[in-house]
Image (cartoon, rainbow, N blue to C red):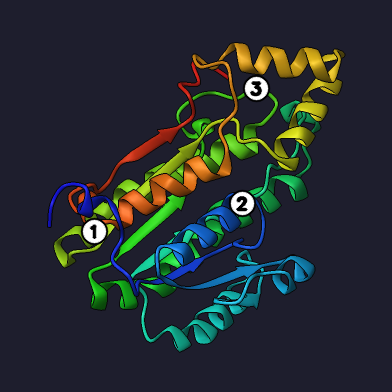
Amino acid sequence: MNVVESLVPRAGLRVMVTAGANGIGLAMAHAFLQAGARVHVCDVDEQALAALPPGISSTLADVSDEAQVDRLFTDAEQLGGLDVVVNNAGIAGPTAAIEEIDGDAWRQTIDINLNGQYYVAHRAARGLRESRGLLINLASVAGRLGFAYRTPYAASKWAVVGLTRSLACEWGPDGIRVNAILPGIVSGPRIEQVIHDRAQQRGISYAEMEKENLSRVSMRKMVEPTDVAAMALFLAAPGGSNICGQALSVCGNVESL
């Protein structure tokens, strides 16, 4: 295999993507499908699941509910095993000062962004051990930087990086690779809502808040979901076979938040 060929995942990979019917998850599901993988996703958005293209099977499931994660893995048994699991599900959480964030909002963010990743990793361990596979956890640049008024989100994403590096040490001897992808400011409805909420918190316009956010990115632009999908494909390709325990930013170099 030459270097160029090593950049393409082998056909027939068995791939699971959580929250795979929208945004980054959908971009990754499409990318793996186009690379010849068999793909199963879950999501809480029933309409988005119904709109998935042929070739992507699905389960309606909320990863913060352990019983629903169990059902997801039961449904995914039709793949005949798992080579790649993408722990993508997450929410933005509240935008507010810490004294204004109530316990329910905090717990919901941690339940989905962190506990959900645990539930998936817990269930994926056996299958990935059998295939000597790959776990990709979605974190964020907020998992390497402080993020005022977004403390539940940032705390959960720092924890995801810790989970990733610990599992890489734990599973590496079994041939399982574990990495985190840290997207930056990704274009789409979620960041639009975050910018709107932060602008309100700061008492400035949406346009001012957006400009301020991009001023902290060296490349002065947002990331596209397909950029994150491309990193996932590379990690699943032979060329990524020695990348393990890493927190890989796809962000245009976000300098601060």
Q: Residue at x 62, y 39 (%)?
A: 153
Mark closer to the chain start, 3 or 2: 2
At label 1, counting other C-alpha atoms closer than 10 Å, the crowd grade (few under 14, some 14-19, many 20 or more) is: few
The kind of residue on which mark 1 rests is Glu
Report if the CB atoms under discs 3 and 1 are less than 8 Å apart. no
Q: Quadrant of the C terminus?
A: top right
Instruction: Measure the C-alpha gap from mark 2 to mark 1.
Output: 24 Å
Q: Residue at x 77, y 24 (%)?
A: 198
Residue 185: percent from the left, percent from the top? 60, 30
At label 3, counting other C-alpha atoms closer than 10 Å, the crowd grade (few under 14, some 14-19, many 20 or more) is: few
Q: Is residue 203 visible?
A: yes
Residue 133: percent from the left, percent from the top? 28, 67
Please give the residue where the numbered disc 2 appears in the rendered image. 90
Q: Establish if 99 lies above or below 216.
A: below
Report if the CB atoms under discs 2 and 1 are less than 8 Å apart. no
Please give the residue where the numbered disc 1 appears in the rendered image. 170
- Name the foreground residue: 100 vs 6: 6
- Please, what secondary structure does the residue beneath circle 3 have? loop
